[in-house]
Amino acid sequence: MQDIRANRVAEQMKKELGDILTRKIKDPRVGFVTVTDVEVTGDLQQAKIFISVLGDEKKKHESLVGLAKAKGFIRSEIGKRIRLRKTPEISFEFDEAIEYGNKIDAILRDLNE
């Protein structure tokens, strides 16, 4: 039962985070950021947000720093939009799955040639 609720909260957070990052965050360091996944613990105390950033390594690092600075604002916005007793602590991480998939795709193309 807890897992179902955690999944619903994670999906709602993902939706709201997309809106917050595109409309509310004015930090120029935060570039084109896409929320790929949100994992919420069973007790809804912590949320791990996986992001993908368009650009090079420097741009990715700057975006992560900008998001870390805006963590309190983002958490308060989530608290206003989602009715929970306690808003989860959030942490941002890069989603390496997309880059990993692209790397495997490139390897497979080389093998076919």
Image (cartoon, rainbow, N blue to C red):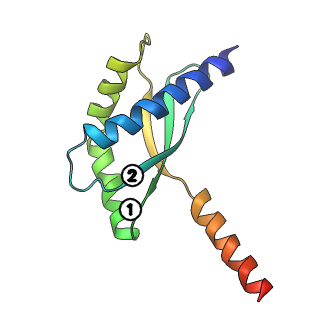
Q: Measuring 30% from the left and 25% from the top, which residue is drawn there?
A: 76
Residue 20 versus residue 41: which sits nearer the camera?
A: 20
Estimate the x, y position of residue 106 in percent, counting from the top left.
Answer: 66, 77
Vertical position of residue 85 compared to residue 29: above or below: above
In the picture as drawn, the residue positioned furthest to the bottom comes out as 113
Please state which amino acid type lies under the numbered disc 1. Answer: Lys
Specify the quadrant that holds the N terminus: top right
Q: Is residue 55 left or right of residue 6?
A: left
Sequence-first tag of 1 and 2: 2
At a point 25% along the width and 37% down the height, the residue shown is 24
Position of residue 101 relative to residue 37, above or below, is: below
- Tag count: 2
Q: Secondary structure at mark 1?
A: helix
105 with respect to 32 (left or right): right
The picture places residue 56, in percent across and down from the top left corner, at 39, 71
Side of 36 relative to 53 (left or right) = right
Q: Which residue is denoted by mark 1 in the rendering?
A: 60
Relative to 3, is 57 above or below?
below
Looking at the image, is mark 1 or mark 2 nearer the viewer?
A: 2
Q: Circle 2 sits on which residue? A: 33
The image quadrant of residue 71 is top left
Say which of 113 and 36 sits in front: 113
Residue 83 % position (x, y): 42, 12
Identify which amino acid the numbered label 2 is placed on: Val
